[in-house]
Amino acid sequence: MSNDTVLTPDAHLAETATQPRLRIRGVGRDFQTRAGTTRAVSGVDLDIERGEFVALIGRSGCGKTTLLRMIGGLLAPTAGSIEVDGRHLWRNGRVEPSAVTRLGFVFQESNLFPWFSVLDNIALPLKLRGMGKTERRARAAELADLVGLQGFERSYPRELSGGMRQRAAIARSLSTEPDLLLMDEPFGALDALTRERMNLELQRIVLQTTSTVVFVTHDIPEAVFLADRVVHMTPRPGRIRQILTVPDAKPRDIELQTTPGFNDIVRSLRHDLDEEE
Ligand SMILES: Nc1ncnc2c1ncn2[C@@H]1O[C@H](COP(=O)(O)OP(=O)(O)OP(=O)(O)O)[C@@H](O)[C@H]1O
Ligand SMILES: [Mg+2]
């Protein structure tokens, strides 16, 4: 479909059913700094299907966050194009609002508002959309249940553990029923056991919501456990080096991590990351 084709709403829906959710073509991002130009991301081509879970891995500085911010409409690419359901997300360095409406973001730090309760934090995006108080509180309570925070709705962020805060942030990001969920190292600050539990929780939540997910992590087993495909990026400039498909059906059990197939994929990715040194 060319940029200027005008479609009726029905025609647009019919068209999107066969398209990837995200079509990333030749995407690049340069930053001008005092030291010169940093080519943070270069020549990225990637299609992501609806309902797919894609993990992005790679060394620090290889452009993962930069790519996520471009997909999320927070940072304009300096090259290439990103289409969401066939709509161009960026036009002349500006984001096209109709292409970003159903988007959720979870960052490494949970970014909850300390003066709001868990429930009010989860309900905030709904309030910003003008939903009435009763309705949004009911919806926020459902989401608190979904992420296992029942009983903590009235707590404040400082009264929660790191894992609970991340769960509240995930609930908040789900409140607007995003079609596309972008997560930038959401579990980076958690201990190994909490992280494993959060991986299972996230898998369960995502399977219930049918969201498409792009998930950045430094943890290779976490990437392989959660993802349908693992995208390995290399730095300077940030490019895709390889894309591995994880064939195991979902939901996956944590025991999967002890199987030879799982460990072969982890070992192969680790080997390729090591080679970059
Ligand atoms: N606003 C900016 N201005 C200048 N350079 C930037 C900016 N943002 C990112 N960069 C540069 O772009 C490159 C990619 O950064 P990015 O944050 O995307 O990496 P990353 O893969 O997310 O790393 P990490 O794993 O450490 O989070 C780095 O070299 C970084 O210095
Ligand atoms: Mg980053």
Image (cartoon, grey):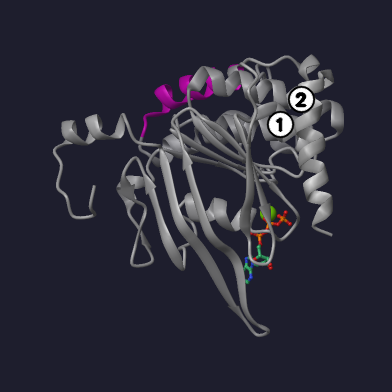
Dominant secondary structure (helix, strand or loop) of the stretch shown in magenta: helix
Query: Secondary structure under badge 2?
Result: helix
Report the span colored magenta: 131-145
Which amino acid, by three-letter code, is at mark 1? Val
Residue 162 in the image: state x and y as whole percent. 77, 35
Residue 247 sits in which quadrant?
A: top right
Q: Is residue 112 visible?
A: no
Name the residue nearer the viewer: 122 or 223.
223
Residue 85 sits in which quadrant?
A: top left
186 vs 9, left or right, is right
Q: Residue at x 69, y 35 (%)?
A: 166
1 or 2: tag closer to the N-terminus:
1
From the viewer's perspective, is residue 10 above or below residue 233?
above
Residue that mark 1 sits on: 224
Quarter of the rendered structure image containing ligand 1:
bottom right
Q: Are marks 1 and 2 in contact (CB under 8 Å)?
A: yes
Residue that mark 2 sits on: 262
Q: Is residue 12 magenta?
A: no
220 vs 133, left or right, is right
